[in-house]
Image (cartoon, grey):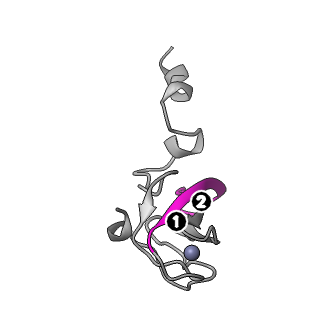
Amino acid sequence: MFYNNFDNVQGEDRWGMVGKTGDPFREDCQLNLPCYQCQQVPLVIAERNWAATNNDDSQRYQIVVSCEHCGAVDYFTVNDGREGKNGKLRHSHRQPTIEDLI
Ligand SMILES: [Zn+2]
């Protein structure tokens, strides 16, 4: 029952298996970006929520990050309209990239 393995992959959600290459913005990862409120690093990915399927069949996610120091919450979009394009953080207006992952 090969297709049943799909649900048993640790740390993956149902949607994460659907995209072509996926993305590395996973829960508990840290981003080397300053908090919009206290300017400290890092931001920790607290939530990864599936949002939509893009026209290129990539999967759009909302990534919620929180500051380790003051607890401020910010968020951005992965695969924002197409695969590989990230949106900007709502509050800090920075655009996270793969290079920002610690
Ligand atoms: Zn902070």
Please tell me whether residue 22 is drawn above or below residue 8 in the rendered image.
below
Q: Main secondary structure of the magenta part?
A: strand
Residue 91: x and y, percent?
Answer: 62, 82
From what the image shows, is residue 29 above or below residue 2?
Answer: below
Tag 1 secondary structure: loop
**Residue sitting nearer the eye, 25 or 74:** 74
Any magenta on residue 89?
Answer: no
Q: Answer whether residue 43 is magenta in the image.
A: yes
Q: Are marks 1 and 2 in contact (CB under 8 Å)?
A: yes
Q: Can you name the residue that lies furthest to the top here?
A: 1
Locate residue 32: give its quadrant: bottom left
- Image side of residue 83 versus residue 49, left or right: left
N-terminal label among 1 and 2:
2
Is 59 located above or below residue 6 in the figure? below
User: Which residue, given by chain and number where applicable, does mark 1 sit on?
Assistant: 79
**Mark 2 sits on what residue?**
61
**Residue at disc 2, CB closer than 8 Å to ligand 1:** no
- The percent position of residue 75, horizontal first and vertical second, equals 61, 70
Residue type marked 2: Tyr
Magenta-tinted stretch: 41-60
| Distance between the alpha carbons at the discs numbered 1 and 2 | 7 Å
Instruction: Identify the residue at horizontal 54%, vertical 76% (top origin).
Output: 87
